[in-house]
Amino acid sequence: MTAQTILIVFLVYTLMLFAVSFITSRKSNNESYFVGNRNSPWYVVAYGMIGASLSGVTFISVPGWVSETQFSYMMVVFGYLLGYFVIAQVLLPVYYRLRLTSIYTYLEQRFGFWAYKTGAFYFLLSRVIGASFRMFLVISVLQYFVFGNFGIPFWATAVIFMLLINLYTFKGGIKTIVWTDTLQTTFMLVSVLLTFYFIKDELSLSLGGLVQSITDGGYSRMVVTDWQSRHFFLKELFSGAFLAIVMTGLDQDMMQKNLSCRNLKDAKKNIITLSWILVPVNLLFLSLGAVLLIYVNAQGIVVDGTSDMIFPTVALKYLGPVAGIAFIIGLISAAYSSADSALTALTTSFTVDFLEMDKKANLSEKKKIHIRYISHFGVALFLILVIILFKALNNEAVISELFTIAGYTYGPLLGLFAFGLFNKISVNDRLVPLIAVLSPVICFVISYHSAQWFNGYRFGFELLILNGLLTYAGLWLIRRPQAK
């Protein structure tokens, strides 16, 4: 498949998004941008959130996951069911009762100024690193197979990619993203299914034979019983529940779409439906990873670079033009789906949590829109700089560590919200930032020495739970004396 063909597919798909954006963003205002005028159909939000939940990292990294951990990640997905139930029954009622635009304003009402800014800062830090990392992977693939062939440097590819996302989201925001995510989820899933079909034909196997090959290849193990392993099934199960709570329920990016639903009842339907849909969808992606590994081994294909290049190499060089087009559209869909919502959520948090634009009654609607436009493009520029920084580092170990560090920052959010929701104790607000810094640092030290200190035990995703507990305990230590 030629670079010219891929470029044409990229441009045609992008034009489709612009068409959707044009239709959905007419007569848009700040309320449309931030919460979609609180009028989004819940089933459209639920379906579209599948793409945002998976992202471009999932789309291209599954073979590497499966080769290292088989299907053990499914225990995390089963844990999601419990986590999403907590979101529906505990967090969403609070958000809707307070009619929040940024979910972190809850922390100001519950604790005070410093807790509020700490929560918002940790979201910004986590999402900037996470979104930039995901976009870096996707842009690297596009650079390798497309733009590099035209002599376009990496930084220019990053600018082009972010500029396109800017242009179709800056006006409609969430109102537009709810519908573009629906389109992108559809293309992503169709791309995966088509890849299955083409590999099945290439290997001359029936669907049942393909499933049997996954089982025989030793890829399908879900339950790891070694308690010392990072992927011990009970650790994965409980970690999945808390990951769902913090990375969806306490994340402005994901919650902003939920808050665009018409009412609390619809928002609950959305989140519960999403939780059940993610089970077969994640199983589908893990199966894809196994099938790609089986195909690569059977054909003796040597892949340049890391395991992240297996899917693009197979789709673009070995399965024919239709499979290549399907992959490119799926990859772009996954990238756009996670990047556009991240850009909108970061802009929302910056303008509401730090500029406090919604509190300035003296500002006209026109002035607020102007500030939002500037913030939107400013956030995009910052994301471009971070993506280029990742490229300059050119060290996968360093970039992976940065991504891991971003994961530590969700722990303080978990502790802050849990402490606020499950008791009525007030705290010394000025000391909250100190607690929120100490908890991840202590967690990192414990994780680094865990095998030595705990008889070979290694932390996995459950480190998030420990992080939240430490934050909760720290808040207890700085509680204010209660009046008798």
Image (tube, rainbow, N blue to C red):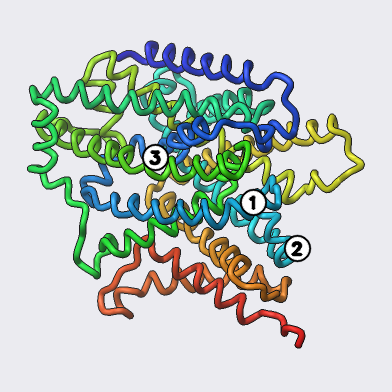
Mark 2 Cα shell of 10 Å, populated few (<14), some (14-19), many (≥20): some
The residue under the point 70% across, 74% down is 426
Residue 99 x, y percent position in the rendering: 70, 47
> Which quarter of the image is occupied by the N terminus?
top left
Query: Residue tagged by mark 3?
Result: 57
- Residue sitting nearer the eye, 177 or 317: 177
Query: Residue tagged by mark 2?
Result: 113
The residue under the point 34% across, 17% down is 325
**Would residue 440 appear left or right of 140 to someone viewing this image?**
right
Q: CA distance from mark 3 to mark 1?
A: 29 Å
State whether residue 272 is above or below residue 147.
Answer: below
Sequence order check, earlier mark of 2 and 3: 3
State whether residue 95 is above or below residue 60.
Answer: below
- Residue sitting nearer the eye, 428 or 11: 428
At label 1, which amino acid type do we have? Tyr
Residue 72 x, y percent position in the rendering: 25, 53
Query: Residue tagged by mark 1?
Result: 95
In the figure, residue 50 lies in which quadrant? Answer: top left
Secondary structure beneath disc 3? helix
Residue 121 x, y percent position in the rendering: 64, 55
State whether residue 463 is above or below residue 300.
Answer: below
In the figure, residue 20 lies in which quadrant? Answer: top right
**Would residue 250 appear left or right of 466 to someone viewing this image?**
right
Secondary structure beneath disc 2? helix
Sequence order check, earlier mark of 3 and 1: 3
